[in-house]
Amino acid sequence: MSLFVPSFETDQDEQAERKMETQTQTQTVGCAWRFKGNSAAKEAASVSMKGNLARLFDNCSKEVKKTVLPLGHGDPTIYPCFQTSAEAEEAVVESLRSGGSVNSYAPGVGILPARRAVATYLNRDLPHKMKADDIFMTVGCCQGIETMVQALTGPKANILLPSLVYPLYHSHAIHSLVEIRKYDLLPDQDWEIDLQGVEALADDNTIALVITSPHNPCGNVYTYDHLKKVAEMARKLGIMVISDEVYDKTIYGENPFVPMGIFASIAPVVTLGSISKGWLVPGWRIGWIAMNDPTNVFKTTGVVESIKEHLDISPDPSTILQFALPNILEKTEKDFFEKNNSILRQNVDMAFDALKDIPCLICPKKPESCTYLVAKLDISLLEDITDDFDFCMKLAREENLVLLPGEVLGLKNWVRISIGVERSMLEDAFVRLKGFSSRHIKTQFTKKLSFIVGT
Ligand SMILES: *Cc1c(COP(=O)(O)O)cnc(C)c1O
């Protein structure tokens, strides 16, 4: 069961309760309470995925008489076909039962066996080997993002983010008052980074270039040559690369995954990762920050120290999971990833084909990684829809189908569809999407279309 999807069961009671709460709030306005909620996170939360998805789920209703299809966020783990590996489960049970130190607090940077295991896991593909000391354990990749934004930024600093980005980068930048500058991704060139654009955006206060590789939501995998150019550009600009590689195991196309750390001798690289996506356990909350830094730039510039200080004052991933991590990383068989990736490949084939029947949604490139498909929304074909948010709101209201508006990821008039779901659900989603778009398409276009297909 998805923990995000409304059950509708307690609708009436809850609504009555909410009404009461509002009334009470109005009545207490006159009291002299000295406290109130802090609005500092308001703007940051307004761009968050969770907040926006909640608004969309609020638009679904029992009256539609269709099950709610939650294709807005990516959490395949609720479906029987996407369950974690037996080895990973076993590792956690074993850790839990091992007694003693798994019940203790862990150091801010993480426990040594976990740090060592992550170094070994990442080093397999790297020319410059990392040591346990170069790894910091985090509460999922999310805390890696938070830590990097906070550890890096001083007054006036700016960071470069892709135009389509995991919204948490944006939220933390807003919350930490860091300026962000968005660079373009090029849909017609396999979603490569517009490097000339990057150069034009950067100035003396630019400190980091964030890349998502493999890319959520575009589903592309950057090539060796492109990433090398990224490193060379970072060197030219004197900035670090932060590479979010949380989807490194979710690859089902032609291009193999290339870790950014390979190019760390050109420009220093911070790799962010976790087991959430690859091992299908986003609820376990364990990830890492890895410093690919053969020339010690991060040490001499104080970045390492700053990361440690931030981790000292923030919560740690559960010690149980930290102790389980070496076995999770080492013992899970290749077959496990291959099986998941082959289901995703079939889903993406189906979804990509089904989109061809929906003229207002155009997918420039079939995804080869991650669990999404992004499509450009051609508003000009639609009668009564103003933008991607309106499209998704009405889709939720009329069809109980929740998709993510591109605006939430930073790019207006795109839509993200999760493909990491049960096959039958995806098929149902496309039937609803087709019905919805044919109801909203401009009539002159319907005629033109039927003329083209000769019906
Ligand atoms: C899911 C995701 C994260 C967050 O990962 P957790 O390990 O669940 O915290 C970070 N970045 C990207 C690109 C993601 O898709």
Image (cartoon, rainbow, N blue to C red):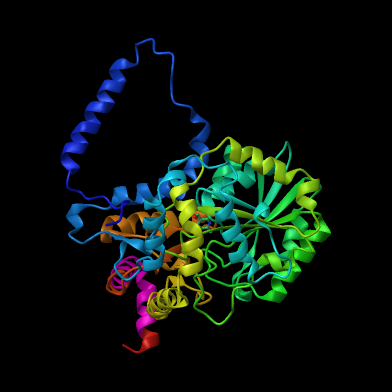
Q: Residue at x 61, y 75 (%)?
A: 188
How far across and down, in percent of the image, does residue 431 sit?
28, 73
Return the residue found at the far top: 32
Q: Residue at x 17, y 54 (%)?
A: 63
The answer to which image quadrant residue 394 occupies is bottom left
Q: In screen coordinates, is 436 left or right of 140?
A: left
Does the magenta-highlighted stretch encompass residue 436? yes
Q: In screen coordinates, is 36 left or right of 116?
A: left
Q: In screen coordinates, is 160 left or right of 326?
A: right
How far across and down, in percent of the image, does residue 151 sit?
66, 42
Q: Which residues are magenta?
A: 430-450
Main SS class of the magenta portion in the image: helix
| Residue 445 visible in rendering | yes
Looking at the picture, does residue 127 appear above or below residue 299? below
The answer to which image quadrant residue 156 occupies is top right
- For the N terminus, which image quadrant? bottom left
| Residue 318 visible in rendering | no
Q: Which one is nearer the viewer's eye here, 408 or 123? A: 123
Q: In screen coordinates, is 27 left or right of 316?
A: left
How far across and down, in percent of the image, does residue 340 sit?
41, 74
How far across and down, in percent of the image, does residue 281 sit?
41, 59
The answer to which image quadrant residue 449 occupies is bottom left
Q: Which one is nearer the viewer's eye here, 381 or 387? A: 387
